[in-house]
Amino acid sequence: MFPTEIEVTKLDPVRARMRDVTQLLFVFEAGAIASSESQLPTVARISERLRHQICSLAGDVGYRSLLASALNLAIEEAPGLRTLRVNADGSLEGLGELARDEIDKSGAALITKFLLLLSNFIGEPLMLHLLRDEWPSLPSIDEIPSGEQR
């Protein structure tokens, strides 16, 4: 069954909030790169930190499955992601094949889809709790806009 127009509208604030959370993660990681020597793209650093948290909850297979599903969903929004693969260890392969200006935009689409799937499985409050374990400065759920104002 396809979602009705009302059901899709109800989901839009959640999607917008996950996009906002993704943007915050990219900002936090951009700040972290200034203080480190990492040459990894921001999306790879975020993915690695997410892997650390999710593997403790769902194991390696759970993380890989979630990331692969998010990748498949994000390809519609960012076709350049077709060059990416999720390795057996859960790392992303193929980021070097994306144009430099496309990496962050495509990576944001991937992370947003990942967070949407994760919040669907474990709920938004637990998802944000896990994220705050890695990014302590991340606001609480009440402090993140619902996206309705956009």
Image (cartoon, rainbow, N blue to C red):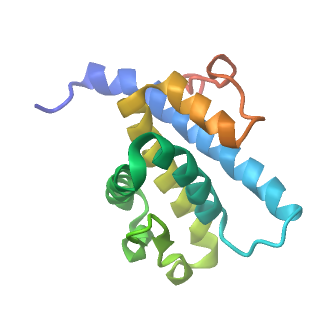
Q: Based on the displayed image, in which of its 4 quarters is residue 19 positioned?
A: top right
- Number of numbered discs visible in the structure rendering: 0
Relative height, residue 42 to residue 143 (above, below):
below
Residue furthest top in the image: 142
Name which residue lies at 87% across and 63% down.
Answer: 34
Residue furthest right in the image: 35
User: In x, y percent, where is residue 127?
Assistant: 52, 32
Name which residue lies at 38% across and 70% down.
Answer: 88
Side of 4 relative to 17 (left or right): left
Quarter containing the C terminus: top right
Quarter containing the N terminus: top left
Relative height, residue 70 to residue 13 (above, below):
below
Relative height, residue 119 to residue 34 (above, below):
above
User: In x, y percent, where is residue 93?
Assistant: 47, 76
Name which residue lies at 42% across and 73% down.
Answer: 84
Name which residue lies at 55% across and 82% down.
Answer: 96
Side of 7 relative to 84 (left or right): left
Q: Work out whether residue 5 or residue 119 is closer to the camera in this orientation and state it.
A: 119
Residue furthest bottom in the image: 97
Q: Work out whether residue 147 or residue 74 is closer to the camera in this orientation and state it.
A: 74
Q: Work out whether residue 55 or residue 29 is closer to the camera in this orientation and state it.
A: 55
User: In x, y percent, where is residue 41?
Assistant: 65, 69
User: In x, y percent, where is residue 14?
Assistant: 47, 28
Q: Based on the displayed image, in which of its 4 quarters is residue 22 positioned?
A: top right
Side of 11 relative to 2 (left or right): right
